[in-house]
Image: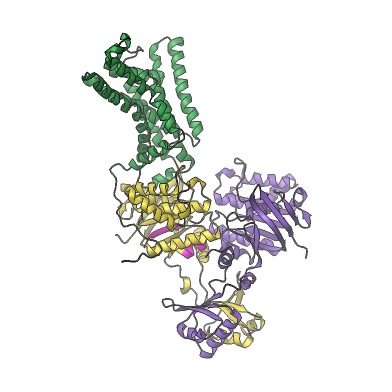
Chain colours: A yellow, B green, C purple
């Protein structure tokens, strides 16, 4: 298997004169990538180019080792696509629909039926697998779409807003499934979502798009390496005395009620614990401040606007 | 014994390209049409023309029942017999009904439920999708035109014991139902691709046949008094085609070669148009 | 301070389908996050609160006034429904001006109000475009601006951030917090728990038509005695820290993560545990990288109460 999953160079795409993709070049290796961006940034268009549904006006590329110019019909055999909109085929139960999709991807019929039962069980639809899919709730349709994208055990999955319309319980289960598929199945994925918390839970790397361009590539979501002098501290008890002792240290309270302390270089972080003990408070939360994905996103979009 | 742990498991097989990538669409479509409401009833009535002609063949083969000389003469003339079977036996109406029944929702329901993108996210091109759907309608139409015709051939052989069929008639028995099915199937799919509302599709499709028939009747009979204008009517064009293929007497004063040209032309235009409609669907 | 919203044994059925059943609730000013699984009755409750439905039983009052059939009240209430309902050909600006006129503003004032409201959600540039040309996120923002147009005292938002991109999620979250910081009230429903956490720490959790919990997330978490608290400590000498707690009967389980040099405790007495931990760190002069509480969030509270796993 090739080491690069997706390789794009100078891709342009126009919708009736509007430039939806503006010279995108990127190289995606194995792993799980998040694709972020404001509405109209070109995320969905880019996914459609990767799926071969849209032909770019200019540019070269290879998807799973196949050339973009040669057409990507065959490549879609190895791609599992979970579209954002609800789609189903009326008058079919889940097993029929899932095995049918497996057959269309090239599985033998018997194998496809067997596999359909497996993936439906896996996504948590085992009890409703003989029910007509048109009677499904929106959360169940979401699971069904994941099953359809999984049935042929693809090499690359493209998930567009995988948790939309799901309630908190369902959403968490969906994210766990995605994490599990990525880990156990060594699946390569591209996940687009507006919910940064979802991306943080599932993706190792993030691409941020704006105005049809890739404006930022985060190679790691572990932002710990940022600023090591800022600490998040959660205090239980009366913080007055504790804060008094911290005079000269810049402290601010964030949304969650945590203190953000900007410690000077000569201030050993561990001495905070002694300070807490002396002033009668407990430190219940302590960690070096990290950039969140939200920070990274806002910065990347802000910079791309300034340019 | 190896342990199968919880969690995601891949599939151990390999995904092989199919020679006919659209074939699963056809099989699935055939199954779905068969499972529709009142399918059995429709199929039963669709077999009526065949049963009627089968009885005719039987009657003609029994000398003691030869009280209707006129009919027997027609039945024993193969080309006239099959021309009658295809164009005057109500079979055309049966095929028309079948095309509505099997074809009207094939694309329109997919438009309504957003399923075309399910197909196109698989290794299929729009033309594969269309081919798969076309084959569904073709299957049912041929099932009730070509298949009974071949059975009649067999029955004739069985009852009379002699092979009387000429090559050109035998070829026509294959070509005519094929062209008729192709035309009906491509037209119904075109109408089906016009709207996500299947009822509207049916109304438009039935209306199209009704209107063209009426127009042909008025123009050829009343306004211009020129029978060639009957070509506007699909029904009369099909009879014209049958006249050419079976060498029987044509009802219209138009050259015979116009009929196949028209039938194939309309089918191709309808298919090409349907294809652009499918391509235009936002995937 | 007078309560903003009072519900007394409020019930609503649709035939034999349960909407909400016997809800009693008093909400004070501030942001209240309304959450629950699909079909829990959130939308029914919001419709009752915005006077679109008449309760079968019980009462609901806003600012002390009955809600149903009381149009005067809606000068002070802004509502953002979950689904779109727009006149397709109308432009965003005209739509808002029209709504402002309905609220009794003069033509000129209505235009100004519309402009201000559109500015707040960043739609002023597309004010002249037909709504049918808006993206989902833009329509969603337009709904929010329609709800805040007349500067109401109470804002009721049903899934306002659905389909909104991350940038505007942050801004609308800020807008909501800012709105409530001026002594006003927001009731907002969402399926995305981190979003609720970013807006408020006061929640109302509805399940099967009933209120399972109401109040401060931390307090609710504290009340869940049957679920021990999870504390994760990341440190180079994480096994030494664990050793210290092996004999402690308030620590129920200890789990190690060798890769991340982490130990995770389950304790039924947080006060005791943290007191010991803090003292131990200071006495032994240990290096600590992180102390976090992985289940001290809304998702955990939700899972415990709604009972999945």
- Judge whether residue B257 can be spotted in this image: no
> In this picture, is A175 found above or below B106?
below
On the question of residue B245 being in view, the answer is yes
The picture places residue A268, in percent across and down from the top left corner, at 52, 85
Q: Splitting the image into 4 quarters, where does residue C228 fall?
A: bottom right
Residue C167: x and y in percent read 55, 59
Please report the residue visible at 39 percent of the width from the left and 52 percent of the height from the top: A116
Horizontal and vertical percent position of residue A3: 31, 62
Q: Is residue B79 above or below residue B278?
A: above
Question: Is A302 displayed left or right of B102 in the figure?
Answer: right
| Residue under the image location 61 percent in, 51 percent down | C82
Asked if residue A195 lies in the magenta stretch, the reply is yes
Examine the image and state in which quarter residue B60 appears: top left
The answer to which of A295 and C212 lies nearer the viewer is C212
User: In this view, which residue lies farthest toward the front?
Assistant: B64
Residue B209 at x, y = what percent? 45, 23
Apparent side of residue A32 relative to residue C148 in the rendered image (left or right): left
The residue closer to the viewer here, C144 or B205, is: B205
The answer to if A222 sits in the magenta stretch is no
| Vertical arrangement, residue B43 with respect to residue A65, above or below | above
What range of the chain is rendered magenta?
A: A186-201
- The foreground one among B198 and A74 is B198
Q: In which quadrant will I find the N terminus of chain C?
A: bottom right
Q: Give C244 or C56, whichever is nearer the viewer.
A: C56
Q: How many marks?
A: 0
In the rendered view, does A40 fall on the left or right side of C95?
Answer: left
Identity of the residue drawn at 33% across and 10% down: B68
């Amino acid at each position: 298997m090739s080491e690069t999953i997706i390789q794009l160079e100078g891709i342009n795409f126009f919708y009736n004169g509007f430039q939806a993709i503006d010279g995108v070049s990127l190289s995606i290796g194995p792993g799980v990538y998040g694709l972020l961006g404001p509405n109209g940034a070109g995320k969905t268009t880019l996914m459609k180019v990767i799926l071969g549904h849209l032909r770019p006006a200019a540019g070269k590329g290879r998807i799973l080792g196949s050339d973009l110019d040669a057409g990507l019909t065959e490549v879609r055999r190895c791609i599992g696509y979970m579209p954002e909109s609800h789609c189903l085929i009326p008058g079919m139960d889940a097993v029929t629909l899932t095995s049918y999709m497996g057959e269309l991807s090239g599985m033998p019929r018997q194998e496809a039926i067997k596999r359909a039962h497996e993936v439906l069980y896996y996504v948590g639809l085992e009890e409703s697998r003989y029910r007509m899919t048109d009677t499904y709730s929106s959360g169940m349709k979401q699971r069904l779409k994941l099953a359809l994208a999984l049935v042929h055990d693809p090499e690359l999955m493209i998930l567009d807003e995988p948790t939309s319309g799901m309630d908190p319980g369902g959403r968490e289960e969906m994210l766990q499934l995605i994490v599990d598929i990525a880990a156990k199945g060594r699946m390569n994925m591209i996940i687009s979502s507006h919910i940064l918390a979802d991306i943080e839970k599932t993706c190792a790397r993030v691409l941020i798009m704006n105005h049809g361009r890739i404006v930022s590539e985060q190679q790691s979501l572990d932002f710990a390496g940022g600023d090591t002098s800022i600490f998040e501290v959660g205090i239980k008890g009366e913080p007055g005395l504790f804060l008094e002792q911290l005079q000269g240290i810049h402290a601010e309270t964030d949304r969650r009620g945590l203190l953000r302390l900007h410690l000077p270089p000569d201030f050993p972080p561990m001495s905070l614990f002694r300070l807490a003990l002396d002033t009668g408070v407990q430190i219940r939360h302590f960690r070096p401040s990290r950039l969140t994905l939200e920070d990274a996103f806002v910065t990347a979009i802000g910079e791309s606007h300034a340019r | 014994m190896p342990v199968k742990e919880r969690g995601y498991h891949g599939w151990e097989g390999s995904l092989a390209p199919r020679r006919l990538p659209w074939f699963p669409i056809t099989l699935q479509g055939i199954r779905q049409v068969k499972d529709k409401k009142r399918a059995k009833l429709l199929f039963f009535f669709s077999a009526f023309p065949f049963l009627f002609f089968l009885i005719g063949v039987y009657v003609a083969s029994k000398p003691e029942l030869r009280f209707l000389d006129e009919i027997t003469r027609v039945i024993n003339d193969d080309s006239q017999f099959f021309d009658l079977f295809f164009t005057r036996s109500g079979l055309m109406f049966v095929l028309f009904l079948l095309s509505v029944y099997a074809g009207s929702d094939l694309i329109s329901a997919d438009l309504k439920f957003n399923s075309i993108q399910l197909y196109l996210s698989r290794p299929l091109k729009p033309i594969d999708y269309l081919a798969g759907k076309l084959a569904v309608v073709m299957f049912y139409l041929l099932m009730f035109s070509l298949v009974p015709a071949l059975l009649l051939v067999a029955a004739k052989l069985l009852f009379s014991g002699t092979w009387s069929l000429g090559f050109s008639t035998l070829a026509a028995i294959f070509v005519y139902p094929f062209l008729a099915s192709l035309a009906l199937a491509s037209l119904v799919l075109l109408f089906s691709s016009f709207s996500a509302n299947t009822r509207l599709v049916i109304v438009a499709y039935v209306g199209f046949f009704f209107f063209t028939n009426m127009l042909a009747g008025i123009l050829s009979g009343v306004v211009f008094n020129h029978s060639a204008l009957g070509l506007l009517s699909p029904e009369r064009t099909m009879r014209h085609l049958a006249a050419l293929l079976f060498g029987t007497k044509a009802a219209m004063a138009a050259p015979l070669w116009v009929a196949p040209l028209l039938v194939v032309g309309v089918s191709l235009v309808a298919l090409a148009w349907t294809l652009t409609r499918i391509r235009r669907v936002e995937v | 301070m007078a309560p903003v919203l009072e519900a007394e044994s409020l019930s609503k059925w649709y035939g034999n389908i349960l909407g909400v059943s016997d809800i009693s609730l008093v909400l004070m000013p501030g942001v209240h996050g309304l959450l629950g699984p699909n079909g829990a009755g959130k939308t029914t409750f919001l419709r009752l609160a915005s006077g679109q439905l008449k309760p079968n039983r019980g009462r609901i009052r806003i600012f002390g006034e009955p809600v149903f059939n009381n149009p005067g009240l809606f000068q002070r209430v802004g509502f953002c429904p979950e689904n779109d309902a727009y006149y397709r050909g109308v432009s965003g600006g005209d739509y808002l001006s029209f709504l402002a006129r309905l609220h009794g503003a003069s033509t000129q004032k209505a235009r100004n109000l519309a402009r201000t409201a559109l500015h707040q959600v960043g739609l002023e540039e597309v004010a002249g475009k037909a709504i049918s040309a808006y993206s989902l996120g833009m329509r969603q923002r337009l709904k929010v601006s329609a709800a805040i147009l007349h500067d109401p005292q109470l804002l009721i938002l049903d899934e306002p951030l659905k389909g909104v991109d991350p940038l505007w999620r942050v801004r609308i979250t800020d807008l909501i917090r800012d709105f409530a910081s001026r002594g006003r009230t927001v009731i907002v429903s969402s399926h995305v728990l981190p979003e609720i956490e970013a807006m408020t720490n006061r929640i109302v959790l509805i399940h099967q038509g009933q209120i399972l919990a109401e109040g401060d997330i931390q307090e609710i978490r504290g009340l869940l005695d049957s679920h021990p608290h999870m504390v994760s400590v990341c440190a180079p000498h994480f096994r030494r820290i664990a050793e210290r707690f092996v004999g402690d009967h308030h620590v129920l389980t200890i789990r190690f993560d060798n890769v991340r040099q982490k130990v995770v405790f389950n304790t039924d007495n947080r006060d005791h545990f943290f007191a010991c931990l803090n003292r131990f760190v200071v006495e032994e002069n240990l290096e600590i990288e992180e102390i976090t509480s992985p289940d001290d969030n809304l998702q955990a509270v939700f899972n415990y109460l709604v009972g999945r796993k």
